[in-house]
Image (cartoon, grey):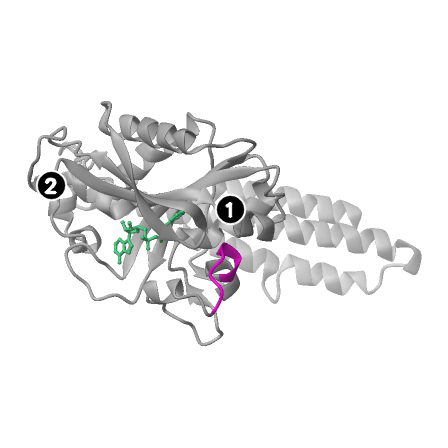
C-alpha cells in the first residue's frame, strides 16, 4: 500500500504538470478525489490493513490527500489567472498601446497639511498618537476637569449615544489616557476627528478636525509653548511668523490662552483672510490644570506642562484660501485636487 501511495502522488504531479485548462484540473480532481477516485479506493483498502500498520498508513493517506488538495487549489488558481490574462489580451476593446494615465488622484489638503504639522512636531521630539472617535463621558469631560455640573459642557454641543458614551467633541478626550501612558515626561501630538451638534456655517462643521498636543516635564513654561507653536508654523508656512497670546478660558488649562498668529498670507499687513486685522486666531492653549495631571496620576507639584488644541480645518482654510469649511468635507474632487500633490 505504501508503494501505491507513493505512485499516486507521482502520478498526480505528472498530471498536474500536463494540465492545460481548468477543465483538465477538474478531470484530475474527479480522478483522484471523486466518489470513484483513487483516494476513496485507498480508503476502502485501508479497512483491510493490519491493525499494527493502520496508524502509519492512515497518516500516509492523509498526507497524500492534503498534497492533492493543495496541488489542485494551486493548479485551478493558476489556470484561472491564465484564462483571465488571455481574455484580456484578446479583448479588442482594450488598447494596450495607449499611454498610461498615472494621475489617479490627489491627496486631500487636510492630509497634506496634517503631514507637514506632524513632521514639524516629530522633528521636535513629539510622539504621534491616535484617539478614539467614540469616547466615554469620563474621558471626554470628567477626566479633563469638566464635571457634570460644569458650564463648559454646554459650550460643546455633544452627540450622546444611547449607551451614555459620546462622539468625541474634542481631542482633549484623549489627554487622560495619553498622560497615563506617556507621562510624566512626554511630548505627544494627537490629531483626530471631532463631532459637535452645531449650526453649520462657513466656519462651523459638525465633523471637523483638531490637532492636540501636550508637553509635560519639570519646569515647563509659557515661553516653551510659544516656541513650539512658532516652530510648527515655520514648518507649515516656510517662514517666520509671530504669535501673540490673549486670555482664554478652558477648564483643563490654567492659565488659558487664545494663540493668534500674524497672518501668513499678508505677513500682518491685513488682507481678506485675516479680516484686515493682520492676525489670525489659531488655537486655544494653556498650562495644564493641576487637576488634569492629578487625574492622570502625575504629581502636579513636581511636573507641569502645556496643552494646545489646534482647530485644524481652519488652518487648512487659511493655507488653501478656501472660504467655507464645508468644502473640505464636500468631496468635490475637481476643487480639492487643485491643492493636492497628484498621486
Ligand atoms: C477645545 O476643543 C479645547 N479642547 C482646545 C484646548 C485643548 C484648549 C488643550 C486648551 C488646551 P474649542 O472648543 O475652542 O476648544 O475648539 C478648539 C478649536 O476647534 C477652535 O478654535 C476651532 O478652530 C475648532 N472648532 C471648534 N468647533 C468647531 C466646529 N464646529 N467646526 C470647525 N472647527 C471647530
Work out which residue is located at the far right of the displayed protein and give it: 52
Mark 2 sits near ligand 1, with its Cβ under 8 Å away:
no
Do the CB atoms of the residues marked 2 and 1 lie less than 8 Å apart?
A: no
Find residue 223 and report its horizontal and vertical position in percent. Answer: 40, 29
Count every numbered label the image shows and give the total: 2
- Image position of 172 (left or right of 5): left
Please identify the quarter of the rendering in which residue 3 is found. Answer: top right
Instruction: Bin the neighbour count of mark 1 within 10 Å (Cα to Cα): few under 14, some 14-19, many 20 and up.
Output: some
- Give the camera-side residue of 88 and 108: 108
- Left or right: residue 269 versus residue 170 is left
Helix, strand or loop at mark 2: helix
Q: Nearer the viewer, mark 2 or mark 1?
A: 2
Badge 2, how many Cα within 10 Å: few under 14, some, many 20+?
A: many
x, y percentage for residue 75?
A: 49, 46
Q: Is residue 178 above or below residue 236?
A: below
Can residue 108 be seen?
no
- Whether residue 116 is in magenta: the answer is no
Magenta stretch: give its range: 142-148
Indicate the secondary structure of the residue bearing disc 1: helix
The circle drawn on residue 74 is 1
- Residue 19 appears in the figure: yes
Question: Which circle marks residue 273 in the picture?
Answer: 2
- Looking at marks 2 and 1 on the same chain, the residue that comes earlier in the sequence is marked by 1
Q: Nearer the viewer, residue 227 or 323?
A: 227
Where is residue 142 shown, x and y percent of the image? 51, 61
Going 8% across and 35% down the picture, which residue do you hit?
A: 270
Amino acid at each position: 500500500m505504501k508503494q501505491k501511495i507513493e505512485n499516486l502522488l507521482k502520478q498526480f504531479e505528472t498530471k498536474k504538470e500536463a494540465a492545460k485548462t481548468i477543465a483538465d484540473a477538474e478531470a484530475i480532481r474527479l480522478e483522484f478525489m471523486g466518489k470513484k477516485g483513487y483516494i476513496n479506493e485507498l480508503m476502502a483498502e485501508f479497512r483491510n490493513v493490519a491493525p499494527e500498520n493502520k496508524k502509519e498508513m492512515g497518516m500516509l493517506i492523509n498526507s497524500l490527500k492534503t498534497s492533492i488538495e493543495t496541488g489542485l487549489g494551486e493548479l485551478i488558481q493558476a489556470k484561472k489567472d491564465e484564462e483571465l490574462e488571455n481574455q484580456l489580451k484578446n479583448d479588442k476593446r482594450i488598447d494596450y498601446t495607449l499611454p498610461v494615465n498615472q494621475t489617479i488622484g490627489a491627496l486631500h489638503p487636510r492630509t497634506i497639511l496634517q503631514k507637514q504639522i506632524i513632521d514639524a512636531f516629530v522633528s521636535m521630539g513629539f510622539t504621534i498618537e491616535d484617539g478614539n472617535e467614540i469616547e466615554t463621558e469620563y474621558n471626554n469631560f470628567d477626566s479633563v476637569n469638566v464635571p457634570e455640573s460644569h458650564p463648559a459642557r454646554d459650550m460643546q454641543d455633544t452627540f450622546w449615544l444611547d449607551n451614555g458614551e459620546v462622539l468625541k467633541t474634542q481631542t482633549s478626550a484623549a489627554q487622560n489616557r495619553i498622560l497615563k501612558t506617556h507621562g510624566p515626561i512626554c511630548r505627544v501630538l494627537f490629531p483626530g476627528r471631532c463631532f459637535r451638534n452645531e449650526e453649520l456655517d462657513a466656519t462651523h462643521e459638525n465633523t471637523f478636525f483638531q490637532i492636540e498636543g501636550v508637553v509635560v516635564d519639570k519646569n515647563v513654561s509659557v515661553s516653551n509653548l510659544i516656541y513650539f507653536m512658532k516652530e510648527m508654523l515655520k514648518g507649515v508656512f516656510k517662514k517666520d511668523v509671530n504669535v501673540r497670546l490673549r486670555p482664554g478660558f478652558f477648564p483643563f488649562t490654567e492659565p488659558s490662552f487664545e494663540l493668534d498668529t500674524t497672518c501668513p498670507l499678508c505677513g500682518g499687513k491685513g488682507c481678506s483672510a485675516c479680516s484686515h486685522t493682520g492676525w489670525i486666531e489659531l488655537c486655544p492653549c494653556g498650562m495644564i490644570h493641576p487637576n488634569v495631571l492629578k487625574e492622570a496620576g502625575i504629581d502636579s507639584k513636581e511636573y507641569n506642562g502645556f496643552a494646545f488644541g489646534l482647530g485644524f480645518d481652519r488652518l487648512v482654510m487659511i493655507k488653501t484660501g478656501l472660504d467655507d469649511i464645508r468644502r473640505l468635507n464636500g468631496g468635490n474632487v475637481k476643487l480639492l485636487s487643485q491643492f493636492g500633490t497628484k498621486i
